[in-house]
């Protein structure tokens, strides 16, 4: 066999091993929560990772309420890194009604950050595209890890 054939076989084997390792990475709420960064709420209290990660239907949900935009983006990025490919995440941002802007700054930042990522696909992005003052005020965003 030529060197090119051997190289393809080796790379295929490495890809299978990586897929196998990722499959068990974080498929349960507890496994995902343990791999998320520790954050503090604005009042200084710790953000309870285990209480804010749960199963909702066929997806893992991460509740980002109370986190700063920077911390919420870090949590969302880490969640996308540790869940297996093909997993659907629900990132709960809230409506942002407590803001003078009338919309969630976190939702805007999350939409922009996820739109730029290659390892994530926003489910039904048209519902979120008009996120600055949209009439469809979802308090969450579904994302497929890819």
Image: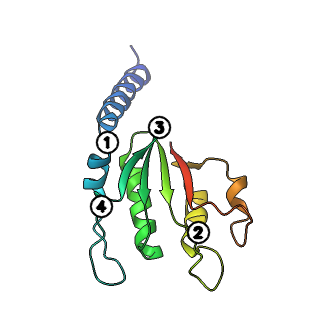
Instruction: Specify few, some or many for label 4: CA neighbours under 10 Å numbering under 14, 14-19, or 20 or more.
Output: many
Instruction: Specify few, some or many for label 2: CA neighbours under 10 Å numbering under 14, 14-19, or 20 or more.
Output: some
Image: 27 above or below 124: above
Marks 4/1: CA distance? 13 Å
* Residue assigned mark 4: 49
- Left or right: 55 as drawn, with respect to 94: left
80, 4: nearer the viewer: 80
Which numbered disc, 2 or 1, marks the residue that appears first in the sequence? 1
* Residue 105: quadrant of the picture: bottom right
Which numbered disc, 3 or 1, marks the residue that appears first in the sequence? 1
Image: 66 above or below 30: below
* Residue assigned mark 1: 28
The residue depicted at 47 percent of the width and 37 percent of the height is 58
Marks 3/1: CA distance? 11 Å
- Left or right: 135 as drawn, with respect to 83: right
Q: Which mark is residue 95?
A: 2
């Amino acid at each position: 066999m030529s060197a090119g054939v051997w190289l393809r076989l080796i790379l295929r084997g490495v890809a299978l091993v990586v897929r196998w390792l990722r499959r068990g990475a974080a498929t349960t709420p507890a496994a995902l929560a343990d791999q998320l960064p520790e954050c503090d709420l604005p009042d200084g209290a710790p953000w309870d990772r285990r209480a804010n990660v749960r199963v909702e239907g066929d997806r893992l949900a991460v509740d980002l309420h109370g986190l700063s935009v920077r911390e919420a983006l870090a949590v969302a990025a880490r969640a996308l890194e540790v869940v297996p490919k093909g997993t659907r995440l629900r990132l709960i941002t809230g409506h942002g009604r407590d803001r003078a802007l009338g919309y969630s700054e976190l939702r805007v930042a999350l939409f922009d950050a996820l739109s730029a990522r290659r390892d994530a696909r926003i489910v039904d992005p048209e519902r979120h595209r008009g996120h600055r003052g949209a009439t469809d005020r979802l308090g969450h965003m579904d994302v497929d890890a890819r």
